[in-house]
Image (spheres, rainbow, N blue to C red):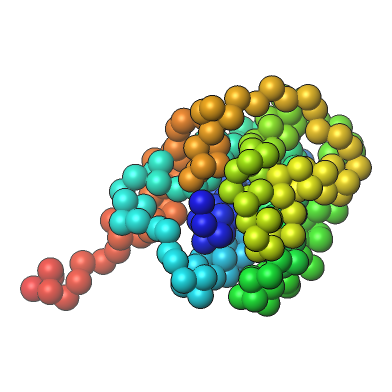
Amino acid sequence: MSLAALVLSIADNKQLLGLRYAELATRAPSLEADIAAAAMGLDDLGHSRVLYGCLEPLGEDPRGTNRETDPASLSALPYFDEPWTSWAQFVAANAILDTAFTVMIEACVNGNVEVLRHRLRKMLTEERYHFLHGRSWLRSGIEKGPLDEAWQQAIEWFGPAGGDTAGLHKEGKLSMGPAELKARLEERLETSAPATNLDWKGWDPKRRRTRPGAVDALTFGMLRGLEEKRFAPATTEKQA
């Protein structure tokens, strides 16, 4: 997989993370958490736009025309396939997955690709609040299920030992490979990942996941602007 495809995966996941944050912005346990969810959602939606804007300077845009019609064309994790139903899912995503994406961005910033070094550096500063918020809620304690799921998907997303991130690390385009990314995530969160039994045989290198599936239809419509087109006023030509 190319570096551009990896950047696309970061962008797709950031976009969906931002949307899922926003969905919980009126259902958090406190007003402060509502405000934080909304703010983090806007941050990640903005970051996704910056990341999408990096594809052309990288010399390749891996997005195909099927992105307008096929939800499975998105390079996003299963964690975002359906709207979250619990605050524990929010916290696990905020603490584990959001930090995992930041660790990968850090690897891009400290790599040898100038456009990523320049354009993504500011994100590391902006993501610090996300990390502190997620870590605080994580330390308050949440149920084990969403937490273990987020850890497993983060490790899957980093990729297998001999996969693309390992190759990009060897080329200097990333400052960390899969093992270093996992170790960095554990270091940031001051905890070890739970034991996982990953079957890399079913790993999809494009979508960076082992589980089939896709984002729900309503969310896909929102992402692609289909709802806006559906309810937009008729054009002058059609009215005529």
The residue sitting at 61% across, 75% down in the picture is 115
The spot of residue 32 in percent (x, y) is 79, 53
The residue sitting at 52% across, 70% down in the picture is 58
The spot of residue 26 in percent (x, y) is 65, 48
The residue sitting at 61% across, 32% down in the picture is 85
Looking at the image, residue 224 sits to the left or right of residue 120; the answer is: left
- Choose between 149 and 203: the one closer to the eye: 203
- Choose between 172 and 18: the one closer to the eye: 172
Looking at the image, residue 157 sits to the left or right of residue 175; the answer is: left
Quarter of the rendering containing residue 158: top right
Q: Quadrant of the C terminus?
A: bottom left
The spot of residue 72 in percent (x, y) is 41, 41
The residue sitting at 26% across, 66% down in the picture is 233
The spot of residue 53 in percent (x, y) is 51, 71
Residue 37, visible in the rendered structure: no
107 vs 87: above or below: below
